[in-house]
Image (cartoon, rainbow, N blue to C red):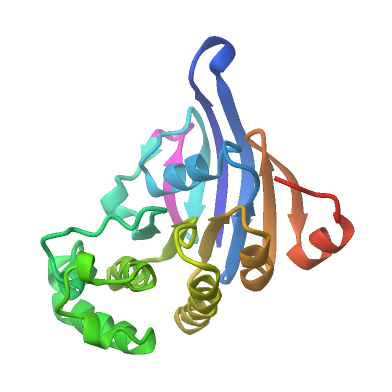
Amino acid sequence: MLDARIHKRLGNGSNAHVIDVNIQAMEDITVLFGPSGAGKTSILRAIAGILVPDEGRIKLGEKIFFDSVAGVNTPMRQREVGYVFQNNLLFPHMTAEQNALYGARGDIQKTARERVSDLFTMMGITKTADRRPHELSGGQEQRVALVRALATDPAIMLLDEPLSSVDAATRTRLTEEIAEIQRQTGIPFLYVTHNKEEAMRLGKNMILIDGGRVTWQGDPASFFNKSTKFSL
């Protein structure tokens, strides 16, 4: 289980924005939902080690990522975190397979190659292995980015609005594939979105973030059924 208490002040003066949250993610998909600028991406960045909190403690299972009191700040490369960005950030000079294998630790290259092959098959993109990013559709690019994050055998997956740039039909298929991959891997997925349909399809647990704070937590269906007037 992920247990993260994060306090971070971003900016100065009247433009300052404070993130002050305490969140938990079990071994399923937890959705971080809320409007743009609410602090969702900053929370992911703190968990990954890209952003250093001012105070707090971030722990995954028995492994401590960050503890301001104990003076612990584990480097990102040692946190075993898979990160899928909003913009997939594929290397244009690499093939889909090379992109997917990028970042895998040297001692697991053989295992990573087997995982990539299996994931390409699962997601129906085996024929794209030798193609470069400009030869891929938006959905194929996102699938490659997802495989790349999983190829490192992460202990947790962080997904930052990974489907925001694809069309509705592709988004529906990809949410189903993401849910299936999570079920098969059994690792926690922390999924950022401000799309109601994605939250409903993916999340067993949803955490509403607004103004840098947790304002609601629970089953997304119950939230949207009760909050018919909610809008972002």
Residue 104 placed where, x, y %? 20, 66
First to last magenta residue range: 63-71
Question: Can the viewer see residue 104 in this picture?
Answer: no
Quarter holding the C terminus is top right
Image quadrant where one finds the N terminus = bottom right
Residue 151, image quadrant: bottom left
Horizontal side of 105 relative to 177 (left or right) equals left
Which is more toward the observer, 63 or 103?
103
At which x and y percent is residue 3? 57, 52
Q: Is residue 209 above or below residue 134?
A: above
* Image location of residue 32, percent across then percent down: 61, 53
Query: Quick one: 24 or 115, which is closer to the camera?
Result: 115
Q: Is residue 89 above or below residue 1?
A: above
Q: Nearer the viewer, residue 69 or 122?
A: 122
The one nearer the camera, 95 or 166, is: 166
- Name which residue lies at 65% across and 63% down: 199
Residue located at (21% from left, 71% from top): 135
